Amino acid sequence: MKTDAYFMNEAIAEAEKSLAEGGIPIGAVLVKDDEIISRGHNRLIQNGSVLLHAEMDAIENAGRLNHEDYVKCTLYTTLSPCPMCSGAVILYNIPKVVIGENTTLMGAEGLLECNDVEVVVLNDAKCRDLFLDFISENPEVWDGELAKVGNTTEVK
């Protein structure tokens, strides 16, 4: 059986892919029955998208699953998911979200928990460092993204 660390490393690979494409380094994988069924990474900049956060990209890339499939899934994401991504998790009844780290960006974990989604935070230093390095090197990009959403998430 593969570990949370294994799947988080796969999500980190997606974050690195986004960074290599000129995007924000956030990645996600959707896992069912101990196998990755889809991958995604933040594509806001690359695609000029308003919706393609890593979590949304991974859920979209899984295609139209049935209820029985969604309830067997775990979503691994390098950073705490925002309210939009958390809403998608709730909508599709994904029962568990594993977060790489939430010290730099706090999303809507409370929303997940109050909807009976299990939330696990790994406090992964690589996830934190990848994101902080990006913000440090591209403050105008990140500030611009926060301004679009009215700064509803907290960056530390």
Image (tube, rainbow, N blue to C red):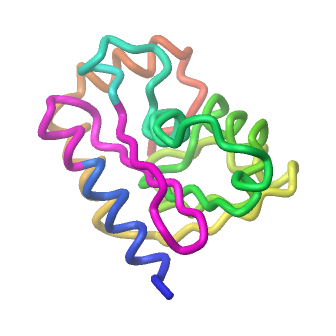
Q: Residue 54 versus residue 38: which sits nearer the camera?
A: 38
Q: Is residue 135 above or below residue 143?
A: below
Say above or below: 15 vs 35: above
Q: Is residue 138 above or below residue 111?
A: above
Q: Residue at x 69, y 50 (%)?
A: 109
In the image, residue 144 lies at what x, y percent? 34, 15
Q: Confirm whether the magenta stretch covers residue 27.
A: yes
Which residue is the extreme one toward the bottom?
A: 1
Q: For the point 28% across and 65% down, which residue is it? A: 126
Is 61 displayed left or right of 18 in the figure? right
Q: Quadrant of residue 91?
A: top right
User: In this rendering, is residue 76 above or below 142?
Assistant: below
Region in magenta: 16-42
User: x, y percentage for residue 125?
Assistant: 33, 68
- Side of 108 where 26 appears, left or right: left
Is residue 128 found left or right of 81 in the rendered image? left
Number of numbered markers: 0
Give the residue displayed 48% in from the left and 68% down from the top: 35
**Residue drawn at 24 percent across, 38 percent down:** 18
The picture quadrant where one finds residue 96 is bottom right
The residue closer to the viewer here, 35 or 78, is 35
- Look at the image and say whether residue 127 sits in the magenta stretch: no
Residue 145: x %, y % from top left: 39, 19
